[in-house]
Structures are given as C-alpha cells and as structure tokens.
Image (spheres, grey):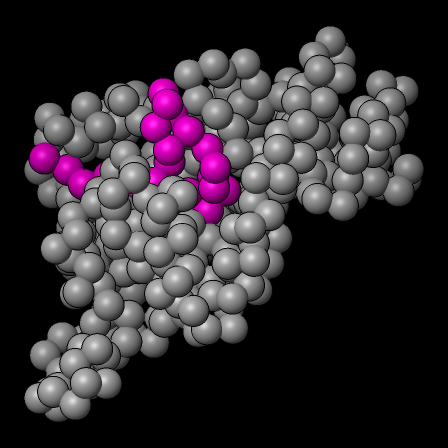
Amino acid sequence: MVERFEKEFEERFGGGCAPLAVGSGTDALHLAYLLAGIQAGDEVIAPVFTCTATNIPFLYMGATIRFADVEKGTLNIDVDHVKRLITPRTKAIVCVHYGGLPCNMDELHALAHEHGLIIIEDAAHALGATYKGKKIGEISHFTMYSFQAIKHVTTADGGMLLIKDRDLLEKAKRLRWFGIDRSAKQKGIWENDITEIGYKYQMNDMAAAMGIAGLEEFNDTLALRRRLLARYFDNLKDLDGVKCVGEGYTDREHAAWMMTIIAERRIELQAHLRANGIESGQVHYRNDRYSIFGGRQQGAFPNMDKLEDSYLVLPLHTKMNETHVDRICDVMKKGW
C-alpha cells in the first residue's frame, strides 16, 4: 500500500521527482536535510516564522540556522533578507509556503543558482498549489508534504518527500529504515551490515491506505477550500482594519490551507469572535521566541516585529460552507 500511495502521489504531484512516504512531515524534512548533505557547522537559511518542525531537525544535526524575515503581504520568507544572509558557509535555503500560497520561487532559485545552494521546500500547507504553471513539488531539489490530521490529505500522521535527483532514492529508502536495504533483506540477499545511520521514519500500510482514499477525494477538497478562501477575500476586501494575507496573486495558485488576516486590535477581535462562538488563533509563531533556537533576536526581523501582534487565522476547513464564511465576516463587520 505504501508503494501504491507513493506511485499515485508521484503521478499527481511529482512532476518527475521520486516519492518517499514517511511517518511525518518532520521525518521528511530531516531526511531532505540529510540527503542535501547538510552537516554540523553548515549554515542554513530558514524562515523565522513557521512551525517549529521546519527548524528543529537542524538542531539534531548541529547545523547553524540563519533565520530570515517575512514578507509583509504573504508571511512567506523575505527574499531580500535571504540575500543578505548568504555567506560562504551557507548550504541550503528552506522556504515555507505559508497558508498554502507559494513563495517567490524564481528569485529563490536565482539565488541558489548564483551561490550553488540547495532549495528545500516545506510544502506542509501547499498540497495542490502551483507557481507559474508548475506544481509545488516539481520545482526544487526537495519538497516535503505533510499528511497530519487536518491537512488536505491525511494519513492520521505522515509525510511525503519528493526528490528531484532520483539517484538519491535508494539512499533515502535506507535512511528511512534504520540504514537497512529493506528490499535486499526481504529477498534474502542482504549482507547483514549497516553502513550509515538510519531512522525509523517509514510509513505503514494502514496510513498509506488512508492516503490513497484521500487522493481520491482531493480535487473536491481543494475546490471547496479555494471557494471558502475566495469568499473570505471578497467579503473582507473593504473592511477597515483588516488585510487578507496572500490575496491578489495571479502568478501562483493558493492551496487554501489557512485563511490569515492582519488585523488592528487583534486581541479584541479574537475576543469578539469567541463571544460569537467563532474560534480563531495564531497557529504558528516566530521561532526566535523559543529558547532552543537561542531566543529572540531584537530588531533582526522588522517585518515580523511589526506583524506578530496583528496576524490572526480564521476558520477554514471541510466542515464549512460559504454560509459559515458569510456569518464570520458579518460578525467582524459589526466591529470589535
């Protein structure tokens, strides 16, 4: 079932990249970092604003994280800041497609080409997104997807890594399973030696079966979420004190995993929504707030500093319809 899920996922999203199903999106990222050759002391540029899963694997590896600021309009990685962070020790750039809106991949790849860097995409939010007609998953050296419980496709928990260099696939499979050549072992021709450190990162058949079922209904899921997101954008376009994150881009298609706004008096708005039975929250936080990453870097991220007290995630999920979006927006229009 795992092999079937990998094959079906590759056919739909891979664009010629090799698929590797694993136990979580974090597993996939760690394997991508290992396959990219990142070692202790190497520098990696990564978003300061993301789920901690993007950056924690670097702590396993002893790599040095150079956090990059966010773009004001998208909360994606700020390419101009990335440019200033590149040093001779930089090995890779990691980008996150926040909420499902693709990053500026042309500029990131231009930087990678100029400096000989590897691009790793954290596409946990972005299943089904496209950038200038290309699927997210067929553009960069490595692309990770998450199948955690509330993603577009879920395997309860799980992930997929798409690998541009197919010659790396066999090594990836060994790293996924304790460093063992599992195919050779099952054929009885394994030499019973382990020569590289591996992990228990495999996906099981029950999870893969859920993934296969999720792919069958994926088109409907994506279409619904995009309709809901568009409804939010339309309803809130003229509301004072609110700006929709990721609105108005025509060169990329949003995967509509999250609906995020920048709001004046966010705390008061959140309380107003809750008083009307509407849950909202921030979901992700700037990573430099956490002691494990060295703590807050004062003044290093002016865009994040400006936005961290004003971004808010509104409900967007498959149990909703357009009427629910209208009600949420009507509550907001009453003021807070």
What residue do we see at 69% from left, 43% from top?
A: 317
Q: Quadrant of the C terminus?
A: top right
Q: Is residue 26 above or below residue 223?
A: below
Q: Quadrant of the N terminus?
A: bottom left
What residue do we see at 56% from left, 45% from top?
A: 218
Task: Say left or right for 116 vs 213.
Answer: left
Q: Which residues are magenta?
A: 116-137
Q: Quadrant of residue 34?
A: bottom left
111 in magenta: no
Residue 211: percent from the left, percent from the top? Answer: 51, 59
Q: Is residue 48 above or below residue 159?
A: above
What residue do we see at 70% from left, 30% from top?
A: 228
Query: Can the viewer see residue 58?
Result: no
Task: Say left or right for 258 vs 38.
Answer: right
Residue 148: percent from the left, percent from the top? Answer: 54, 58
Task: Say left or right for 281 vs 17.
Answer: right
What residue do we see at 17% from left, 52% from top?
A: 166
Q: Nearer the viewer, residue 202 or 80?
A: 202
Q: Quadrant of residue 175?
A: bottom left
Query: Can the viewer see residue 334?
Result: yes
Q: Quadrant of residue 313?
A: top right
Q: Nearer the viewer, residue 257 or 303?
A: 257
Residue 135: percent from the left, percent from the top? Answer: 37, 33
Q: Nearer the viewer, residue 254 or 289?
A: 254
